[in-house]
Image (tube, rainbow, N blue to C red):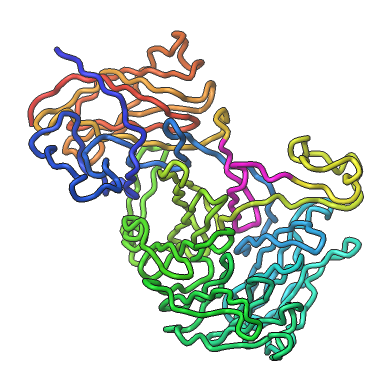
Amino acid sequence: MTQYSARVNLSAANYPFSSSFWGRTIIVGGLDMNFNRQVQSTEDTDKDRGIPQIFYGHNIVPTGQGFQSIGYDIQIAGLIGKTNFDRAIPIKDVNDNQFLFSLGLTDGGGSNNYIFDASIVPNFWNSVSPFPAGTFNKKPTVTTAYIRGNQYLYFEKIGCFQYQNIAGVQSLVPVVLAGLVATNIIGITQSNGYMIAFDGRTIYWSNATLETDFVPSLQTGAGSGAVTDAKGRVVACLPLINGFVIYTVRNAVGASYSGNIRFPFTLKEIAGSNGITDVEQVTFEANSSFHYALTSAGVQKVDKIQAVELFPELSDFLAGEIFEDFNEVTIQFLLTYLTSQVRTKIVFISSRYLVISYGVTAGSFTHALAYDFAFKRWGKFKITHVDCFEFSPPNFYGIRRYIDLLGNNYISLAGTSYSLLSIQQSVAQLPKKNIGFLQQDGTMQVVNFDFGSKTHDGVLIIGKFQHERTRRIIHQTSEWENRVQGANYAYYILATEDGKNFLPAISPTIVSDEVNNPGIGENVKGEARVDGMNISFAHVGSFHIISGVMNWTLGGRR
């Protein structure tokens, strides 16, 4: 009987966000394959071509050659018994020492203001200047502004604070914003040397030379103005290069720097913009000329002039009240239709990764889709978390003994001279070591992209392989490269009888690798006679799949 062979496609840009969205594929085209999608669209020419490809994965990211699994490394330990960490906010002091802040609401409307300060030995989160019970009647918006080396934290309708550590005594020091009524102000941001404050209808800009002075004055330039183009309540003001964006519940207004001390910002509605409900639905942390936002119209790229729709399939998936996971132990899909939309947040990391966290349960996320703008393809993380953010390692500072340097290596202290070891130690932010996930107990983990790591827990599913519409397919052998040597890795064959629903997974017999030593080399070959309407492959564990070849024969007719 004739045996056929084909190479696996690992470069498709299209990615179905649920396996149930991925239809039947075909290797040998029939009459239905004569349709040329490029006639209608040139943006994604391989979309819906019916070519077998990746249709599910988690804890994977694209590479130049295929897909690799990823893992997670703990950078900061959590606090035993705590489950109230929320959002991670990187902060600094006037000496450019770096810290992490997270608000933790407590029973009765109080809060723990958790701060990780690497100068405190031993290193762990401390609750600094906690707010007493009754302070909050809901989760407050916490915003920041960084101006002239000073970073300010503003707690919605509470007030402005700065973090200080004096001789090991940590505190959040209240800062008076002259001319403002603290209980009216929702938050702050910065632009062109001004601190910007806002309430539900108005923006306020500070003295051009003293950011804490908001007393209206023709001499200093401090003043305020209504957001006349706003179509709803102001939710947030978030910085952009040479201006900022005012987001409301219905639209967005661009604020461009004018250079006029009396009216330093020109406000104009952003064409095509839609509303948001939370500051965490905008990627404001990146120093770019635009934001990505999860708006009422879906995912949009927003600058001060216009808002453009992006990734319509993603927007539909997030709004579609559907949730899917894959159990790597039972090798089964778990599909759930919900009664409400999934919770989401968005962040843009290193001007490369757009990460959209989502989950079903209030208070945490379980998965995160990641779009790599370098390779223009999707990856996915599976980790329970409350926040994803760009992690910059908090530096320790002040006098240090040799024992206090344990856990640091030469590369992590890049930029630190011997003379600075007892003053301020720089901690290098390394490429692809800065996608951070904060968990409910304060545990902070970063994504491990190391190709040779043996601790990854990735899943990559490729298919559905069908020879032609009218014939079944019989898997004989398949060969893959690269799995990680000596790691926990396995691959499975998933067949269907009806083209849609998977039968129990089958483990092939590993017959050889590149040196005929199963379990040692990176190349793995397996054989199993599996008959089905179509065939898929599930890779589990540590791997960097750069190539795959499947060999098959034809089965009976439908």
Depicted 368 relative to depicted 35: above or below: below
- Give me the residue at 36% from left, 35% from top: 11
Bounds of the magenta segment: 428-449
Q: Residue furthest top?
A: 516
Frontmost residue, 293 versus 462: 293
User: Quadrant of the rendered structure where residue 475 is?
Assistant: top left
Q: Position of residue 537 (x, y in %)?
A: 33, 31
Which residue lies at the image location 41% right of the left edge and 78% below the top edge? 250
Q: Please determine whether, in this image, residue 450 is positioned above or below residue 116.
A: above
Q: Residue at x 80, y 64 (%)?
A: 94
- Disc tally is 0
Q: Is residue 180 left or right of residue 37?
A: right
Q: In this rendering, would 112 be left or right of 464?
A: right
Q: Residue 186, position in %: x, y? A: 60, 81
Q: Is residue 238 left or right of residue 120?
A: left
Q: Quadrant of the N terminus?
A: top left
In the shown orientation, is residue 75 left or right of residue 451?
A: right
